[in-house]
Amino acid sequence: MKNHVPSAFGFLSLMPWVLHAGDNGTIDGQGSVWWNWFKRKTLDYTRPHLVELMNSTGVVISNLTFLNSPFWTIHPVYCSNVIVQNVTILAPLDSPNTDGINPDSSNDVCIEDCYISTGDDLIAIKSGWDEYGISFARPSTNIIIRRLIGHNRNGSGIAIGSEMSGGVSEVYAENLYFFDSSTAITIKTARGRGGYVRNIYILNVTLVGVDTAIRFDSTFSPHPDDFYDPNALPVIERITIKDVIGNNIKVAGLLKGIEGDTFHHVCLLNIALTVTSGSPWNCSHIQGYSAMVSPETCEPLKESIYPNHSSDCYHLSNHLRSSGCFPKSCNFCLKLMPLYSLVDQKWGRPWSLVYLQNDGELRAAVDALQ
Ligand SMILES: *[C@@H]1O[C@H](CO)[C@@H](O)[C@H](O)[C@H]1NC(C)=O
Ligand SMILES: *[C@@H]1O[C@H](CO)[C@@H](O)[C@H](O)[C@H]1NC(C)=O
Ligand SMILES: *[C@@H]1O[C@H](CO)[C@@H](O)[C@H](O)[C@H]1NC(C)=O
Ligand SMILES: *[C@@H]1O[C@H](CO)[C@@H](O)[C@H](O)[C@H]1NC(C)=O
Ligand SMILES: *[C@@H]1O[C@H](CO)[C@@H](O)[C@H](O)[C@H]1NC(C)=O
Ligand SMILES: *[C@@H]1O[C@H](CO)[C@@H](O)[C@H](O)[C@H]1NC(C)=O
Ligand SMILES: *[C@@H]1O[C@H](CO)[C@@H](O)[C@H](O)[C@H]1NC(C)=O
Ligand SMILES: *[C@@H]1O[C@H](CO)[C@@H](O)[C@H](O)[C@H]1NC(C)=O
């Protein structure tokens, strides 16, 4: 991430503090001035995120409404044990890059009961960009998303990438409802990204009025600079999408791998879409399996899941499965959090607890023990 500017709320202060957000618990980023500067190309720097959480362990954001972020709305980066619960995020459908929640090089993130309607991706899981993400090598892993409702006009309901160079794995998303949207589920990557996206499990998705239900886009061209390695190829494997129904869908799947870098073990199971396009699936450099998919899927995915490939299609790590918040509510991982996040072993950071919640007044508190 080049040209980083301070965000509207950076919870790096060592003091507890309180701020007021109005009776509704609403935080308005008043982004329109930034969107206009961006559209007029008068900015020398990137725009701020509304909530920026860096190097934090044990974060709860709940019962709040966030409006009109200048850029991404909630951005936990290098964080662990993050809960986002019962949050509404709104920005105009034509506002630029106003992603909802972007877990970035973060682990053990639980997002549930959110409504998001913005100008770009509703949730986008990231882990660093090209050579910088490859060398820093901090993945996003153990991400749970459930009961998400939303729409977009120029983004995706759930996206992974395009900055995924530190790796993304163990993503479990269920009970998703997307309407009047451009894309529902996307994996974005490119030559030069390196990294991996693996063990992704998305189920129970309802779509109404979506241009493209599932998209793998491997030509996401922006690179941070000229020093990226075009031979750094991403590994994309074990992506399972199950129990999807959709009405008024233009295209079921635009699934493009990379020549010489086939995306493996893509599993489609129990998918029923009413599609208007004459060629509902368009696949290249993809390999995988399917069962009960309508309209009939593309040739490279026609091999049956059963009996020989179910282990490729059902594959989440034991850590995610035993994390307390699976398969239950994030509240269960909240209860477990202090047990396993007192010290972040790998990064050796101080224990910190950030609460941003609406219980009468908005409280934001940061405790840090050195
Ligand atoms: C609370 O939310 C409602 C509906 O979104 C809005 O009309 C009202 O102005 C808000 N009140 C405050 C104090 O923000
Ligand atoms: C966050 O941690 C990274 C890696 O340890 C470090 O480079 C960076 O300076 C830290 N940022 C802040 C704001 O503490
Ligand atoms: C969700 O948050 C709103 C305030 O934004 C609150 O009124 C409501 O009770 C919360 N619902 C749940 C289930 O926590
Ligand atoms: C969110 O609001 C609900 C309903 O008021 C409350 O029960 C719950 O504890 C709140 N969540 C948090 C994390 O404070
Ligand atoms: C849609 O998003 C893409 C990539 O983020 C951007 O290049 C394009 O300008 C956006 N289109 C509109 C209509 O906002
Ligand atoms: C599937 O998700 C929908 C919300 O989109 C929910 O109403 C329904 O109960 C879910 N089904 C199951 C089996 O969890
Ligand atoms: C598939 O997409 C490519 C472009 O990515 C296009 O040239 C081709 O015509 C499409 N094939 C079908 C059958 O739609
Ligand atoms: C499954 O694998 C076994 C052992 O490799 C093989 O003999 C069998 O033909 C396979 N079945 C199918 C349906 O591919």
Image (cartoon, rainbow, N blue to C red):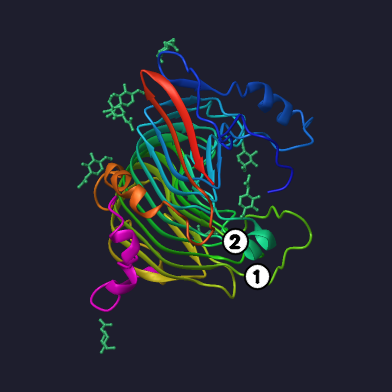
Tell me whether circle 1 and circle 2 mark residues in contact (CB < 8 Å).
yes
Amino acid on which disc 2 is placed: Ser
Q: Position of residue 225 (x, y in %)?
A: 77, 56
Instruction: For mark 1, give the secondary structure.
Output: loop
Whether 163 is drawn above or below 3: the answer is: below
Residue located 37% across and 34% down the image = 114
Amino acid on which disc 1 is placed: Ala
Mark 2 or mark 1, which is nearer the start of the sequence?
2
Query: Which residue is situated farthest in the front direction here?
Result: 370
Instruction: For mark 2, give the secondary structure.
Output: loop
Q: Position of residue 188 (x, y in %)?
A: 55, 55
Q: Position of residue 324 (x, y in %)?
A: 27, 53
Return the residue at label 1.
232
Whether 44 is drawn above or below 146: the answer is: above
Return the residue at label 2.
165
Crowding near the residue tagged with mark 1, few <14, some 14–19, many ≥20 C-alpha atoms within 10 Å? some
Whether 120 is drawn above or below 77: the answer is: above
Residue located 79% across and 30% down the image = 42
Q: Which residues are magenta?
A: 301-325
